[in-house]
Amino acid sequence: QQPKKHSKITMSSDSLGTFIHRLSGVYRDPQRVLRDAQSLLSSEYGAHLRPTTEPLLNNDGSSTPPVLVLRGTIPMVYRNVTYNLPIDMYLPPPYPLRPPT
């Protein structure tokens, strides 16, 4: 029996665009957010990330309206072994002026 290959699940640009559209008014440049998210999700590093929305909790205890979150795992190789690290990447409302957290 041959080992199963993991198939890469890709999200169409239309569905991600619809997802970003639901966040209308949150980002100054939603097209930039869409372009950057598509680029990451279609790369080998973004293969296991999925978009969702969630408010971002600021250091002062306040929170933002729901923002785009890319949640899942990213691969990291250490001593020739690949580890899949869990990650939640929040794109704050001033993105790209403020980096993801």
Image (spheres, rainbow, N blue to C red):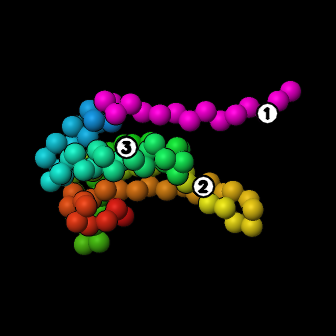
- x then y, percent, for residue 50: 44, 42
Of the numbered discs 3 and 2, the one sitting upstream in the chain is 3
Q: Residue 38 carries which label?
A: 3
The residue drawn where x is 39% and y is 47% is 39
Q: Which mark is residue 58?
A: none
Label 2 sits on what residue type?
Pro
Q: Which mark is residue 3?
A: 1
How far, Cα to Cα, is label 3 from label 2? 18 Å
The secondary structure making up most of the magenta span is: loop
- x then y, percent, for residue 31: 22, 45
Residue 6 in the magenta stretch? The answer is yes
17, 26: nearer the viewer: 17
Of helix, strand and loop, which one carries label 2? Answer: strand
How far, Cα to Cα, is label 1 from label 2? 20 Å
Specify whether 40 is left or right of 29.
Answer: right
Of helix, strand and loop, which one carries label 1? Answer: loop
Q: Residue 75 carries which label?
A: 2
Label 3 sits on what residue type?
Gln
Split into 4 quadrants, where in the image is the N terminus?
top right
Compared with 27, 101 (above or below) is below
